[in-house]
Image: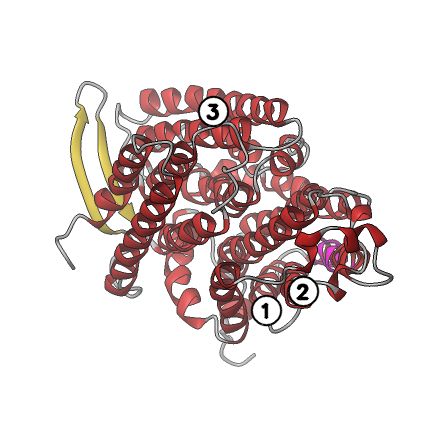
Amino acid sequence: MSSFPYLTVLTVAPLVGAAGIAFLPKDKPELAKRAAFGWSLLILALTVGLWLQFKPDGARFQFRESYTWIPQWGAKFTFAVDGIALVMVALIALLVPLVVLASWHDADKSKRSVPAYFALLLALESTMIGVFAAQDVFLFYVFFEVMLVPMYFLIGSYGGHQKQYAAVKFFLYSLVGGLFMLAAVVGLWVLGGHTFDWQTLVSADFSVTAERWLFLGFFLAFAIKAPFFPFHTWLPDAGGAAQAGSAALLVGVMDKVGTFGILRYCLPLFPNASKYFAWLGLTLALVGIVYGALVAIGQQDLKRLVSYTSIAHFGFIGIGIFAFTTQAGTGAVLYMVNHGLATGLLFLVVGMLVSRRGSALVSDFGGAGKLVPVLAGVFFIAGLASLALPGTSPFVSEFLVLIGTFTVNKTVAVIATAGIILAAGYVLWMIQRTTQGTTNPKLLEIKAMTRDLSLREAVVVTPLIVLILVLGFYPKPVIDVINPAIKATMTDMHVTDPKATAGTVEAGK
């Protein structure tokens, strides 16, 4: 194992880059863009090194670093990653340079500073990596709250219609959830032996009542962040108002902190309470699958439509988590990665269409594929990935979730399967109304609608398309990283897979 402090560097380096870019001259926006792109590529290179040195068959948590922070509270700067955290850090490192490239002109038309926009993107990257790498509960809480700040300004300062309303709503929802978590964090410290160390707390013994209240404090914060129904209403507003690149990071990565938090904190720290409240998690997830899909069908704004589809997708992640099987849990984490790839691609392509048309309304398109056929083709691929078509990576994760759930709860799995049918409806109808059919005459009057996919845009979408297709046929490298961490989580909960899922047969049967 390398002694290089990968996680500290990956957390601090983007913040250093953000500070440097923020002070670049405002009259030299191209310099800020190139600096942000180059810095984000450096973070990606470091993450590749982290991935290559991670050993799936090694210790559960690797690259552990711990530094004294607040000794009176027992709080430390402790970083470590297991397979679940590693794949999320890798997703962040991949998406940020693509978002920087896709957002090349997003801040130009605003009255705000262009260097500040790209500095905020790097600051957001720093906090997102920190929240997934933290192994000290208080440190996790700090990153959980601090990462709201750069996204708030990305939406409120550089967003579109109703940006201030959407930014404030996003911030308040998350802040309220964070207050519930803070109360639970304090309770955890008091009842857990005056420590915030995750590895110590996972062995702590809580009373039944205390464990259930602590679980609810964490779960409510994570359910809002994810978001699960009925805490979802901030997401369509934030996703619709944010620039496409910011929305891709918001929905593709930030929201995963909620489902990651349930896996990392609720299940291992409060195993009995997690089992007791499993019905609540499964119910919210199922309602989200059906509700998100039905509401998405009726949306007229492309970015809001994509946001609502994510509510349905998070429902699948939720049932995968609360099924308490290795297959479903591995599928849920893989879904977190694949949803980031597919929805990130979909948001970025929607942003490309909107920048040309000057509108996100579906009714303002129609037949756009005849004018920009390559871009329309990429939009079609992103849509198929979003509906989890076989051969795309989301299908693998969705299949694992459903088959892992079916072994323990057939009713939940059958109801969730209805979401697949609804997904085909809202995605195909979106594509048909936007790029197919008779060409909207107004599109012919817009010169920008004659520009097909540019080289810069091709560089943005190609890696995502390649990963979606490659992982759709060969997901083993990612599953091998995730699976040991999920098995360890199930061990923390003292649950075992059904014999059919584990692939074992009793002698004589």
Q: Which residues are magenta?
A: 412-421
Image location (x, y in percent) of residue 152: 50, 27
Q: Nearer the viewer, mark 2 or mark 3?
A: 2
- Which quadrant, please, contains the C terminus? bottom right
Q: Could you tell me if residue 208 is visible in this image?
A: no
Q: Judge left or right: residue 478 versus residue 401.
A: left
Q: Judge left or right: residue 301 versus residue 31.
A: right
Q: Tags 2 and 3 in contact by the CB under 8 Å rule?
A: no
Label 1 packing within 10 angstroms: few (<14), some (14-19), many (20+): many
Q: Secondary structure at mark 2?
A: helix
Q: Please report the residue visible at 45 percent of the width from the left and 29 percent of the height from the top.
A: 148
Image location (x, y in percent) of residue 113: 43, 30
Q: Secondary structure at mark 3?
A: helix
183, 305: nearer the viewer: 305
Prevailing SS of the magenta stretch? helix
Which residue position holds label 2?
Answer: 384
